[in-house]
């Protein structure tokens, strides 16, 4: 029975995600009403260019987002993206006690605390499952299912566009530009795809994941960020030779210093992982995230990380949750940042490295290079040298070393007269240190 008063919903944006949200709302209205205990009524859709939206219900379209938010609605769904006007519109909705569902990771990673405070002040909900890893239920498990555990690490592939590009480069040797165009055409990329390739999107998601996992405010500016623009065909070939795969990883860790004090380390960068690692086989726009917790052990979340319909599934899930809360007269769990752990600088992050050098092929070269590693206390795990007609290729894989020590080592090695070029430096993850 769905006798409840209709839950009125305003939607801001009707692009890749919004179009699918509107479709699912229409097609599943009877089931949604039964699950919520009240019908859902979409009362308006704000867009910039109404003429572009021939397939949308014309009577619902408006360019006046502010008026739509101020109208008599219970929930605002935001799928515009970017900081403004999304931030102002959502603050205005929350301050008026209207619940918010958003897929906007860039906004949450920069202004999350301001939005959560506004929600707390008025008793409204703010839900954002779609903001990280598309269709994959990940944030609710972190916020609710694992609320009784102590999470130590969250690591995974959280950007579909870059995974699509890297998968294509590895499988077929396709070029970077053409694959990015394809990812945009398929609706995976952000409106400005540099957000994907330069790692901003993954860094926003890492900030959200770390905040939830460690009950600490982590913003995008706390996240060390490297994108995939510097990943070359040579890097991918080098990884292949070593039975490894290059992936853009987001890594959020709880770390304990020598003084016993806890901190968090959050970083996004390309890394080589062994072909046998579960993340290595995650292809195309799929995402996968490992969560490690003291009592639960290892958990893995996998699914479609981008695209209109998968993302709309997560938006609808949130919409049902906030609508149920409205019907029941309560609200969902609040954001919690009680732990207030400091964020550790990247220089102190510790990983293994793969370093590929072009060197002169003569006696004593290896010992000169090895001496620089020793001087910086970076321990070598493996070395592979291959002679070529006029020089040699030297590949060094290290044991775990701090980012700062590795940087100094590479800077010094680059200046050695016997080193012709530092061809690539890439972190190695997913192996024993
Ligand atoms: P699109 O660029 O496809 O759509 C954006 C929509 O917002 C368009 O309909 C646009 O209107 C509208 N819009 C833009 N600016 C304004 C404005 N000032 N006022 C009113 N409407 C405006 O983006 P997506 O659907 O791909 O993404 C939406 C959000 O979802 C973003 O936050 C994104 O990060 C997030 N997201 C996207 C995923 C994906 O796979 N695409 C996955 C997970 C999250 P018009 O069309 O008229 O220009
Ligand atoms: N542009 C994002 C991606 C969309 O490629 O992962 C999903 O958040």
Image (cartoon, grey):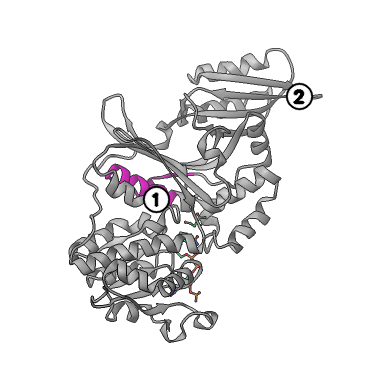
What label sits on residue 391 in the rendered view? 2
Image coordinates for residue 38, horizontal then vertical, percent: 27, 73
Q: Is residue 252 visible?
A: no
Q: Determine whether 221 is above or below 31 in the image.
A: above
Q: Measuring 54% from the left and 80% from the top, which residue is drawn there?
A: 52
What label sits on residue 220 in the rendered view? 1
Q: Determine whether 74 is above or below 102 in the image.
A: below
| Residue extending furthest toward the right | 389
Q: Nearer the viewer, mark 2 or mark 1?
A: 1
Where disc 2 sits, the SS reads loop
| Residue extending furthest toward the bottom | 59
Q: Measuring 26% from the left and 65% from the top, which residue is drawn there?
A: 324
Image coordinates for residue 360, horizontal then vertical, percent: 73, 22
Image coordinates for residue 33, horizontal then vertical, percent: 32, 72
Q: Determine whether 22 is above or below 240 in the image.
A: below
Sequence-earlier tag: 2 or 1: 1
Q: Quadrant of the N terminus?
A: bottom left
Residue 97 position by quadrant? bottom left
Residue 408 horizontal side relative to residue 314, left or right: right
Tell me the crowding category of disc 2: few under 14, some 14 to 19, or many 20 or more residues within 10 angstroms, Cα based.
some
Residue bounds of the magenta highlight: 203-225
Tell me the crowding category of disc 1: few under 14, some 14 to 19, or many 20 or more residues within 10 angstroms, Cα based.
many
Q: Main secondary structure of the magenta part?
A: helix
Query: Is 209 in the magenta?
Result: yes
| Residue extending furthest toward the front | 1
Whether disc 2's CB lies below 8 Å from ligand 2 is answered no
Q: Is residue 140 visible?
A: yes
Residue 413 horizontal side relative to residue 99, left or right: right
Query: Is 350 in the magenta?
Result: no
Q: Measuring 49% from the left and 53% from the top, which residue is drawn there?
A: 305
């Amino acid at each position: 029975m769905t006798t409840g008063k209709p839950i009125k919903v305003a939607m801001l944006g009707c692009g890749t995600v919004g179009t699918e949200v509107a479709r699912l709302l229409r097609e599943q209205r009877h089931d949604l009403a039964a699950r919520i205990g009240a019908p859902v009524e979409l009362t308006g859709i704000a867009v910039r260019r109404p003429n572009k939206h021939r397939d949308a219900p014309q009577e619902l379209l408006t360019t006046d987002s502010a008026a739509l938010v101020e109208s008599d609605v219970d929930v605002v769904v935001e799928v515009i993206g970017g900081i403004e006007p999304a931030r102002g519109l959502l603050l205005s909705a929350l301050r008026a006690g209207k619940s918010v569902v958003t897929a906007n990771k860039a906004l949450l990673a920069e202004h999350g605390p301001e939005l959560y405070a506004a929600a707390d002040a008025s008793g409204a909900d703010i839900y954002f499952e779609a903001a990280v890893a598309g269709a994959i239920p990940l944030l609710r498990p972190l916020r609710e299912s694992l609320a009784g555990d102590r999470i130590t690490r969250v690591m995974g592939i959280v950007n579909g566009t870059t995974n699509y590009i890297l998968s294509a480069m590895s499988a077929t040797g396709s070029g970077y530009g053409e694959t990015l165009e394809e990812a945009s055409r398929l609706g995976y990329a952000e409106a400005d795809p540099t957000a994907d390739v330069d790692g901003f999107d993954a860094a926003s998601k890492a900030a959200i994941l770390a905040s939830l996992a460690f009950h600490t405010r982590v913003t995008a500016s706390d996240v060390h960020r490297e994108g995939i623009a510097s990943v070359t065909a040579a890097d991918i070939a080098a990884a292949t030779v070593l039975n490894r795969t290059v992936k853009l990883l987001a890594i959020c860790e709880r770390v304990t210093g020598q003084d016993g004090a806890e901190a968090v380390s959050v970083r996004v960068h390309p890394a080589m992982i062994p072909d046998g690692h579960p993340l290595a086989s995650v292809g195309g726009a799929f995402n996968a995230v490992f969560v490690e917790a003291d009592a639960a052990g290892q958990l893995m979340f996998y699914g479609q990380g981008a695209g209109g319909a998968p993302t709309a599934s997560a938006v609808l899930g949130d919409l049902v949750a906030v609508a149920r809360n409205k019907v029941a007269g309560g609200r969902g769990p609040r954001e919690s940042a009680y732990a207030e752990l400091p964020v550790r600088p990247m220089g102190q992050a510790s990983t293994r490295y793969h370093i590929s050098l072009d060197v002169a092929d003569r006696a004593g070269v290896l010992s000169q290079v090895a001496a620089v590693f020793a001087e910086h206390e970076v321990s070598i795990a493996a070395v592979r040298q291959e002679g070529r007609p006029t020089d040699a290729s030297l590949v060094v894989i290290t044991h775990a070393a701090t980012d700062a020590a590795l940087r100094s080592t590479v800077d010094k090695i680059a200046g050695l007269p016997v080193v012709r070029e530092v061809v690539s430096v890439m972190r190695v993850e997913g192996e024993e240190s």
